[in-house]
Image (tube, coloured by chain):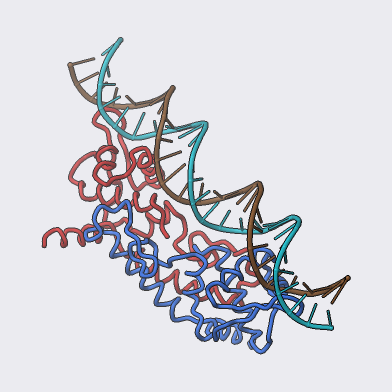
Chain colours: A red, B blue, C cyan, D brown
Amino acid sequence: MISKKAKYALKALLFLAKQQERELVLISEIAAAELIPRKFLEAILVDLKVQQIVQSTRGKNGGYTLVKDPSQISVGNVIRMVDGPLAPVHCVSHLYYRKCEECADEATCEIRLLMKRVRDATCAILDTTFLTDLNKVNALIVEE
Amino acid sequence: MISKKAKYALKALLFLAKQQERELVLISEIAAAELIPRKFLEAILVDLKVQQIVQSTRGKNGGYTLVKDPSQISVGNVIRMVDGPLAPVHCVSHLYYRKCEECADEATCEIRLLMKRVRDATCAILDTTFLTDLNKVNALIVEE
DNA sequence: TAATTTGTCTACTACTTCTATAGAGATTCT
DNA sequence: AGAATCTCTATAGAAGTAGTAGACAAATTA
């Protein structure tokens, strides 16, 4: 299960992607449009800023904007930034690898190989889907 | 991420599957063999008993045994019993479906369709892999 | 320069879930 | 009766989730 925080992050980024022609978008505007608690969203955007996905300007007429092109921001990476590994167990994660404590021997662990397949399948989907792909889906639905 | 509890449940069931010729296996034996805290395992086995995966006999010479054949117990179902839905969001789960609160409209939610693909890919793997399949993998490794 | 509008930072809180542990109780066998 | 087992209830610390409050810093502009 992904957290609400991760969903909020995705929604906020998708909103920013749709507003790409604009210089800056207010936190409060994103919060209102995507029904995200405003203060919670602030914290999420700070995280995304640290990760260099968005940038901000302070003061009057300030706001947020994307740093990277939405076609370069994968859903997988956004979820990783907020929730951590996509893998179902640490011992098959590439970026967050950690030996499982409760596993006596990784080489003969029956569960590990199976979970690796799950990880690979999940990453194959989420790491090849970008913000632009999601907004395209939405555009198609809206056109109907 | 799956919980330790789910991993323990899988390991305990795999152990029972390997001991199928025996009538009954002690909790303490499973705990020792699989390095699972004994009292914690007790609680897990009670859950699995409620789900009718295992059965138990009390008193002296008591213990646990599988109810179903290991070729009929899928990893997906074990994880669901312990951790709940395999789906990354409730709104794409089949058995635990629930509308996402933070989603204004399911029909136009950009994230939903993508997560459905993740769910389907995950379930395709975990619902078609049974305890016997995992023990076979292990047997092959041990033979080498 | 003072007021206003914005994002930033720190701290706190409430709730839930996770990972257990302790101990008395019930059941069965010998 | 006594020993070996599973069972049930209660408790608890740590971590994670989902926020909220309020002072602070920076930029604009009147």
Question: Residue D29 appears in which quarter of the rendering?
Answer: top left
Of B125 and A79, nearer the camera is: B125
Left or right of residue A95, residue A74 in this image: left
Which part of the image, by quadrant, shows the C terminus of chain A?
A: bottom left
* D26 up-or-down from A76: above or below: above
Left or right of residue D21, residue A90 in this image: right
Left or right of residue C28, residue B141 in this image: left
Q: Residue at x 43, y 67 (%)?
A: B86
**Image coordinates for residue A2, horizontal then vertical, percent:** 41, 57
**Image coordinates for residue A122, horizontal then vertical, percent:** 40, 68
**Image coordinates for residue B65, horizontal then vertical, percent:** 63, 81
Which part of the image, by quadrant, shows the N terminus of chain A?
A: bottom left
Question: Residue B29 appears in which quarter of the rendering?
Answer: bottom right
* A30 up-or-down from A59: above or below: below
**Image coordinates for residue D19, horizontal then vertical, percent:** 39, 40
Residue farthest along the left direction in this orientation: A144
Of A141 and B5, nearer the camera is: B5
* B101 up-or-down from D27: above or below: below
